[in-house]
Amino acid sequence: MPKIDRKLISKKIQIVKDLKKIIKSENVLDHEDQVRPFETDALSAYKKKPLVVVFPENTKEVSEILSYCNQNRIKVVPRGSGTGLSGGALPLADSVLLCLGKFNKIINIDYKNRCVVAQPGVTNLSITQVVQHKGFYYAPDPSSQIACSIGGNVAENSGGVHSLKYGTTTNNLLGVEVVFMDGTISRLGGKTFDSEGYDLLGLITGSEGLLCVITEVTVKILKKPQTVKAALIGFPTIEDGGKCVSQIIASGIIPSGMEMMDKALIHATDNFVKAGYPRDAESMLIVELDGTEIEVKELIEKVSNIAKKNRSSSIKISKNENQRLKFWAGRKAAFPACGDMAPDYYCMDGTIPRGKLAEVLKEISRLSKKYNLPVANAFHAGDGNLHPLIMYDANEKNSLEKTEKFGADILKYCVKVGGVLTGEHGVGVEKRELMCEMFNDNDIQQQIKIKRCLDSSGLLNPGKVYPILRKCAEEGRIHVHSGKTKFPDIPRF
Amino acid sequence: MSIVEKQNSPTYQDSNSTVYPEKEKEVSNLIKKFYKSNIPIEIVGSGSKRKIGKPLQCAKVLNLSKINGIIEYLPEELYIKVKACTPLEQIEKELKKNNQQLAFEPINFGYLLNGKSDSGTAAGQVACNISGPRRFKVGSVRDHVLGFRGVNGRGDIIKSGGTVVKNVTGYDLSKLICGSYGTLVVLTEITFKVLPLPQESKTLIIHDQQLESASDFLDRSISSSSDVSGATFLPIQPENNGCMMDVEKTFKLNDLKHKGSLTAIRIEGSKNSIEQRVQNLINELKIIDTNISILETYQSEIFWNKVKNLEFFSLSKNNILRIVVPPSECIKLVYQLSNKFKYFLDWGGALMWLEAYELSEEMFESIRKKVVKLGGYVTMIKNSDYLPYVEDVFTINSDRFNISQNIKKSFDPKRILNPEKMYTGI
């Protein structure tokens, strides 16, 4: 992380006093016991207590806080619900942690324009909840949807199990209100499709809190399909399952969701929720299809035929909504089920071309033996997003380091087969040093220049996403020739 | 050296100072040279959309038409990776072999801008980010670009994204490049997401509706669960001196059974499914005493191609404006623009194409004011002989202008790539 500004920490009393002038004093937390709950997000392996935690209540307050911090060179870390898995909301010891928890209102439900305007602290699920009585829903559904905030979803460009057909956050977002580090409030997009000029909305989506703080979000809502059914298909090998996935897509079917689990996870989740999974199978697919009744029937038939051609050992079709939800219950319990099997687990998030699935899973199993750590695999097969869950015991010496190395090896392999480091969890702190696996110096410099033009002093969420130069150079990833870096005038965030 | 050999040389310059690089590395070297000597350049592919945006006067033209060809197409992975200036026709033909398509329905601007079919290149589509009738369902060009490679204004080769749909590794520069009209990066390689072609298409036409009832039908269709993929209103408008748009002349299809305006709703999918959905839709819309026609796949495709490619306007010498507003505001907008202009609505009312006869810059700015007030934006897509130049082709506010200027600087600090193409000062 960036060097701690000790001088700034010594001014804590004054900073707290100043912040209390900007917002209500009860919304400023500075006692050690008050800030402790905010020392981590859902990547709990990393912890750091912030200097002070603030809870602004409106956009003007956010703007004044940012402007004050910018003038006084104070780092700011934005935070939504803290459910991020890559440490994107990890505080710094010399930072103000800016929490958007009080931005928790739905501002406008607009059926005529088929959108909902919400404050960023509203949870993902509650957007669907306020429109479902009229048959509408919000499509992206990350597994943390009951807790994660819509602002956080925009910052991380969250996906979920339905993104193959319905896209991720960026494809379902119409507009935002944001505050930049210098305090400027801007509206990007609105209720129209696309906006003219540079797609700033697209740029800030998935920017992990490095470019601006989101204070309002406008998302698209969709009408629920008439019929939804799921098929549960078991396979004798992982290769058969993988081939089936590719052939379903190649046949022209875009399922609304297509999930794959390996044997370890089939057993773990079935023990946990008794979902009725095929326990003898080496791999299992949940294929969800939606549309009209006739359409779904046709699609199920087609999918069943493709499965049979790929030596499926069992096929179960959901008979009713309850059974469909039961099929999903196992998949959605993947994380707690792993928690049941080992004291700690570490969730990775690479995306690979679907056709490379069997190859990547083989490599993961080789690495699992090498590191002597068990692993279970959940896979958004439809869009190639892989979530290996590495199980370990944090009480064992060096086990976290070993697990992280294992995880890094998996991600490097994902990149090697043509995939990417992260599909939906973000780079954050966790994968920062791996960025050089995917990008070269030019690519990273261009991104850093964009950061610099919106946050000239590099105060917003520093230490995230982009590699600290020293470390990258040490590992031989950025080429530093005789101590001279390219563009020495540019600060490395 | 023969003329052809000369022209094929990477450093060939014709009398207009046009250079034709063949490889990414050559583009990079050329731009490095231009950067050093402060030479502004116009970036051109096939030139099919060159007339959109402000006219450029650059010392050099960088013609990328030699950087073309399909690099990799994996149907089962749902992507196609192409060199920047691969003709769109070639891409669409290749995809069709595997029953796939670019779902955002690229517009063939040739009819409008050059009087004949010319769908341009992959990079041209990305640079303009203008999508066809399916936009409200599947997203626009920007939602279908998975990654790119290109050269920035310093001559550095950069890349972003990849070949997979789910990717949050670093800033999503693919979005930023879409609709940047070549002002940030000279594209050299693009990866598009592709989707299956729908097996069949049906179009429900409701005849002879007025704006209000048509708009209501479109709105209810999109809000239904029938999964509509096209929703347009083509009004019959009074004869207007000099305006070319004529619905009855453009749409001479056998299955159009009645006269009057056309309110058209498209449904795509497998045969049985779309029959059920069209029937559901007719029930949901409570269409009883209204004249309707149903176009089957063949005619439905012809119909939407004409809508998409703006064939009404193919002979028009007038100004053509593209206006995007929140769908709820479209009726208000039509009223406010009075009956001086001819128009049609697409995207269920969220998009209006307008043909304006004898437009002045003041009138254009007054239209812009009204559109902005309704939460939308307007673009001058084609100039007329009466109004060959407007200062602000695109809409922007001062906030976004400042940010955009900074973004431009981060890619192209000396402003040598298509300078002023979009905005004065960018």
Image (cartoon, rainbow, N blue to C red):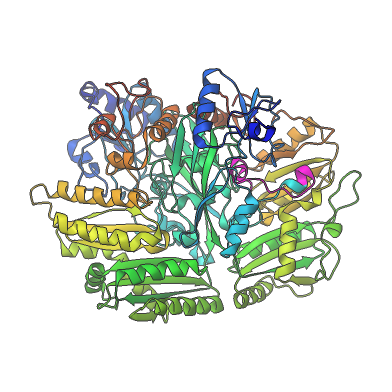
Question: Who's the residue at 36% across and 76% down the image?
Answer: A233
Quadrant occupied by the C terminus of chain A? top left
Residue B100 lies in quadrant: bottom right
Residue B36 image offset from top left, x and y in percent: 52, 19
- Does residue A107 appear in this view? no
Residue B423 image offset from top left, x and y in percent: 63, 29
Foreground pick, A409 / A117: A409
Q: How many numbered marks does the figure carry?
A: 0
Locate residue B311 relative to residue A116 in the image: left or right.
right
Foreground pick, B252 / B376: B252
Question: Who's the residue at 13% across and 57% down the image?
Answer: A372
Residue A328 image offset from top left, x and y in percent: 35, 70
- Does residue A228 appear in this view? yes
Residue B11 lies in quadrant: top right
Residue B378 lies in quadrant: top right
Quadrant occupied by the N terminus of chain A? top left
Q: Is residue B122 magenta?
A: yes
Locate residue B193 relative to residue A313 in the image: left or right.
right
Furthest toward the top, the residue is: B37
Residue A38 image offset from top left, x and y in percent: 25, 42
Residues shaded magenta: B112-131
Locate residue A241 relative to residue A201 in the image: left or right.
left
When the figure is inspected, residue A437 is found, relative to residue B199, above or below; the finding is above
Q: Is residue B357 magenta?
A: no
